[in-house]
Image (spheres, helix red, strand yellow):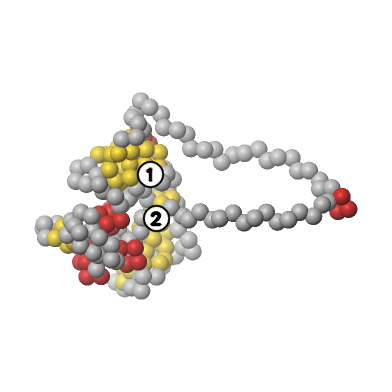
Amino acid sequence: MQISTLIGKPILTRTGDKLGYVTAARLSRDLTKLSALCCADADEEEFYLPARTVLAVGDAVIAGNARLKAPTGVACPVGKRAFSYTGEELGVVTDVETGESPSLLIGEGEGIRIPAAQAAIGESVVVYPADVPKPAAPSRSHVRPRRKDPPPMSEQKPTAPPPAEPTAPPPNAFRIDRTNLLGRRVKRSVYDENGAPIATAGERVTPEMIAAARRKNRLLALTVNTLTNLY
């Protein structure tokens, strides 16, 4: 399944009631399957659907009533910049195909399709040739140090609390909503399947533009061509 087939689609219940639309996808760590969908309702309030509640995908996503308090899985790498292991820029990840042999699509159109097993995914994506092993992910296992009994209270010296460390801002998340699209300039023109322009390079994104892209299932393309550095 290609993740681009989900982004921007309306979400309906089995009885046809509209719940909202899909803004992003969360995947299993190995990218083989969908873990959860990040969604927004008509008021742009966010909610999360577990993958097991998705009943069908066509012109809309048909889903059950289950909800998640927080999304599971890992963030989809769509929108991340990709580089070769020697530092050459390859483009932007525009799609992910899940399944037994997941792959990443880099660039628009035919682009470059690479097996996910050859990619190291962090704030950016680094692609390794098949004959060059990618670095192993850091192990989560660790040896717990032996616990030492504290000295008696009479021997303990008062210590000042350590200064609070500044909290690093989270990395930019690839997300589709009015908040991070409205007012931004489109870097590359976006067209519908018939070649009609939805957004022209240099224009600022408007609510009407977002609505048109959503109707034409081109919301993902509008977001990639607006929020990422394509040049």
135 left or right of 157 in image: left
Compared with residue 131, is residue 200 higher up or lower down, i.e. above or below? Answer: below
Residue 214: image x %, image y %? 24, 64
- Mark number displayed over residue 42: none
Residue 179: image x %, image y %? 35, 66
Is 165 or 114 nearer to us in this picture? 165
- Residue holding disc 2: 173
Is 187 or 23 nearer to us in this picture? 187
The quadrant in which residue 226 appears is: bottom left
Is 79 or 56 nearer to us in this picture? 79
Secondary structure beneath disc 1?
loop
147 left or right of 153 in image: left
**Residue 21 in sight in this render:** no
Q: Residue at x 81, y 48 (%)?
A: 150
Secondary structure beneath disc 2?
loop
Residue 106: image x %, image y %? 27, 43
Q: Residue at x 37, y 64 (%)?
A: 39
How many numbered marks appear?
2
The furthest residue to the right? 154
The furthest residue to the top? 131
Badge 2 crowding class, 10 Å Cα cut-off, few under 14, some 14 to 19, many 20 or more, is some
Q: Residue at x 75, y 43 (%)?
A: 147
**Residue 208 in sight in this render:** yes
- Residue type, mark 2 in image: Ala
Question: What is the distance, in whole Å, between disc 2 and disc 1 at their CAs?
Answer: 12 Å
Residue 217: image x %, image y %? 22, 60
- Residue type, mark 1 in image: Ser
- Residue holding disc 1: 124
Badge 1 crowding class, 10 Å Cα cut-off, few under 14, some 14 to 19, many 20 or more, is some
Q: Residue at x 29, y 46 (%)?
A: 92
N-terminal label among 2 and 1 = 1
130 left or right of 169 in image: left
